[in-house]
């Protein structure tokens, strides 16, 4: 059953999803240990707790000196290691202090010359013929990376290794991050059995719930797997009601035109609005996107009805669910990750439908190349696992030749 005339081309469908995504507000926050924050989104800015660097820092092993003195031989009057402070008063003229990378530059010195650029003879050093030294060379001034109290990581930043290192340098043992949105996963289908059960000859294991749970976690959500729903109205309705406490609901299967594809019908009976009931793409055409109204203790809830064929499920997740999920995890509405790559082999598309084919790309620095992976259609999980991206072929062309630049969807 078609709930409304809501079938769109890919770009229009994505625009609709991104508009709804932009209206989402992130969850409440929680404070968790620094190392648990990878992949999470900051709910409160991180500040520098002191100047960075905290002192004028030498970036070389060498000699601290006054650049203006460097034309003459200089007397070495001391040594300062990383972690030490040179205790003497200001550096006298025509003197130098041996210094290590990461050590504070002694007062009075205005440059550090690298050890490779001087000749040393006892306690005298001189610049090697042809070498020069400018003021401030090889010194990073105190506070030049950040001043004490300055924001170094704004709220809404996604935390990865770079951010964890920066937060650690500011002394943060914990960070305040947004709670991960809870995403309900409902697999529908009379043929499905769970992993704990042995499938009969005509039964299929519920792989979608597992694939989706992994993709949800990767995109910043907390998956909540519900029991498999049979293709019967009362059972489907009960499972949908059980998913109302989550922030977002994903259903897989039951959205095509078959006699037992009941997902839209049941959602409609619960008062759902439908924004999208199909997209001109393959795989993925039967995608459904809508919202259940607030009822009782539950606020309005967005849902996606994803086609049940496992590759269709994953492709539509990357294209439409992921932007929505990232928005409710706090990073704002972002489109799927597309990239341009050069086709390594000829490939054919299909007029009228945008095609999304499992493919492998080589993340080459100069010229990323992509070739599609042979597959048996949108149920072929083995082909999907041999792929590392999807080739996106526009609907207005049937033949693509090696050397053509096409769009790929990263995953
Ligand atoms: P449907 O969208 O319900 O018509 O299902 C399309 C195809 O996907 C059928 O071959 C189903 O058996 C298969 N399928 C549906 N749901 C799942 C699932 N949770 N795991 C694996 N395959 C599924
Ligand atoms: Mg089905």
Image (cartoon, helix red, strand yellow):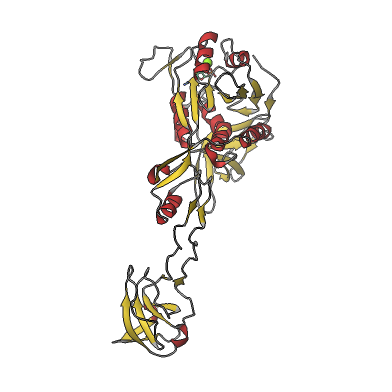
Q: Residue furthest left?
A: 122
Left or right, 90 with respect to 248, comes to: left
Closer to the camera in the image, 371 or 160? 160
The image shows residue 7 at horizontal and vertical percentages of 68, 24
Is residue 276 among the parts visible in the rendering?
no
Closer to the camera in the image, 106 or 320? 106
The image shows residue 220 at horizontal and vertical percentages of 48, 37
In the rendered view, would you say 348 is above or below 207?
below
In the rendered view, would you say 147 is above or below 294?
below
Q: Where's the N terminus, which quadrant?
A: top right
In the rendered view, would you say 134 is above or below 144?
below
Quadrant of residue 60 within the rendered picture:
bottom left
The image shows residue 178 at horizontal and vertical percentages of 49, 39
Q: Residue at x 50, y 11 (%)?
A: 235
Closer to the camera in the image, 388 or 31? 31
Q: How many dots with numbers?
A: 0
Q: Residue at x 60, y 22 (%)?
A: 294
Q: Residue furthest bottom?
A: 72
Q: Residue at x 40, y 18 (%)?
A: 194
In the rendered view, would you say 77 is above or below 229?
below
Left or right, 317 with respect to 118, comes to: right
Is residue 262 among the parts visible in the rendering?
yes
Left or right, 387 with respect to 1, comes to: left
The image shows residue 98 at horizontal and vertical percentages of 34, 78
């Amino acid at each position: 059953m078609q709930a409304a005339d809501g079938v769109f081309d890919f770009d229009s469908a994505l625009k609709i999803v991104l508009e709804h995504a932009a209206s989402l507000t992130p969850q409440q926050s929680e404070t968790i240990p620094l190392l648990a924050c990878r992949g999470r989104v900051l709910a409160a800015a991180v500040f520098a707790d002191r100047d960075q660097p905290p002192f004028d820092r030498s970036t070389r092993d060498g000699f601290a000196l006054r650049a203006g003195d460097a034309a003459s031989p200089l007397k070495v009057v001391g040594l300062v290691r990383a972690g030490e402070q040179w205790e003497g008063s200001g550096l006298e003229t025509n003197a130098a202090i041996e210094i290590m990378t990461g050590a504070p530059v002694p007062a009075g010195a205005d440059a550090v010359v690298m050890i490779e650029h001087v000749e040393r003879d006892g306690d005298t050093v001189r610049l090697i013929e042809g070498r020069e030294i400018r003021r401030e060379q090889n010194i990073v001034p105190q506070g030049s990376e950040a001043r004490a109290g300055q924001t170094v990581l704004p709220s809404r930043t996604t935390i990865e290794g770079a951010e964890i290192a920066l937060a650690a340098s500011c002394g943060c043992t914990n960070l305040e991050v947004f709670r991960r949105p809870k995403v309900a996963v409902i697999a529908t289908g009379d043929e499905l059995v769970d992993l704990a059960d042995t499938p009969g000859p005509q039964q299929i294991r519920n792989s979608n719930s597992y694939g989706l749970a992994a993709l949800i976690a990767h995109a910043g959500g907390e998956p909540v797997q519900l029991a498999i729903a049979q293709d019967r109205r009362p059972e489907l309705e009960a499972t949908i009601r059980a998913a109302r406490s989550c922030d977002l609901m994903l259903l897989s299967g039951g959205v095509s035109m078959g006699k037992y594809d009941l997902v839209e019908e049941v959602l409609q009976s619960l008062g759902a609005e439908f924004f999208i009931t199909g997209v001109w793409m393959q795989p993925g055409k039967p995608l459904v996107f809508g919202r259940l109204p607030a009822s009782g203790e539950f606020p309005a809830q967005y849902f996606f009805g994803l086609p049940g064929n496992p590759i269709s499920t994953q492709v539509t997740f990357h294209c439409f669910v992921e932007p929505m999920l990232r928005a409710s995890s706090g990073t704002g509405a972002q489109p799927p990750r597309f990239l341009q790559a050069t086709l390594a082999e000829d490939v054919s598309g299909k007029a009228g439908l945008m095609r999304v084919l499992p493919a492998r790309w080589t993340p080459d620095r100069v010229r990323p190349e992509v070739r599609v992976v042979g597959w048996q259609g949108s149920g072929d999980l083995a082909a999907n696992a041999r792929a590392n991206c999807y080739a996106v072929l526009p609907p207005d062309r049937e033949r693509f030749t090696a050397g053509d630049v096409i769009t790929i969807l990263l995953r």
